[in-house]
Image (cartoon, rainbow, N blue to C red):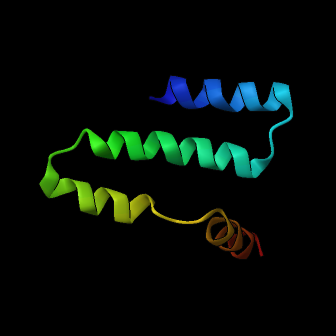
């Protein structure tokens, strides 16, 4: 899993992807991981990772202040 994320980040860096594109690719990967869980864990997993880029960026900026 970490290897896939690192490959995505490297590819986006080389091809000039935006931070938003990187975040969305990681979220896509995370949703695919949630889909592999039993139904009893799926909703919790999706709730945990379901955050828009704007929310993520706002929280990130707040934590840096």
Image quadrant containing the C terminus:
bottom right
Q: Residue at x 86, y 34 (%)?
A: 16
Q: Is residue 54 left or right of residue 65?
A: left
In this view, 32 is above or below 46: above
Closer to us: 65 or 4: 4
Q: Residue at x 62, y 72 (%)?
A: 55
Q: Is residue 53 left or right of residue 44?
A: right
Residue 53 spot, x, y in % from top left: 65, 62
In this view, 8 is above or below 33: above
Quadrant of the rendered structure where residue 25 is?
top right
Residue that extends furthest to the right in the rendered view of this protein? 16
Residue 60 spot, x, y in % from top left: 68, 66
Quadrant of the rendered structure where residue 58 is?
bottom right
In this view, 25 is above or below 50: above
Residue 32 spot, x, y in % from top left: 38, 40
Quadrant of the rendered structure where residue 40 is?
bottom left
Image quadrant containing the N terminus:
top left
Q: How many marks?
A: 0
Q: Residue at x 64, y 29 (%)?
A: 8
Q: Is residue 25 left or right of residue 30?
A: right
Q: Residue at x 63, y 66 (%)?
A: 56
Residue 43 spot, x, y in % from top left: 26, 61
Closer to us: 5 or 64: 5
């Amino acid at each position: 899993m970490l290897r896939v994320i690192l490959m995505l980040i490297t590819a986006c860096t080389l091809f000039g992807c935006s931070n938003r594109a990187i975040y969305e690719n990681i979220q896509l990967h995370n949703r695919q991981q949630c889909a592999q869980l039993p139904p009893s864990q799926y909703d919790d997993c999706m709730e945990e990772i379901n955050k828009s880029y704007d929310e993520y960026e706002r929280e990130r900026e707040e934590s840096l202040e």
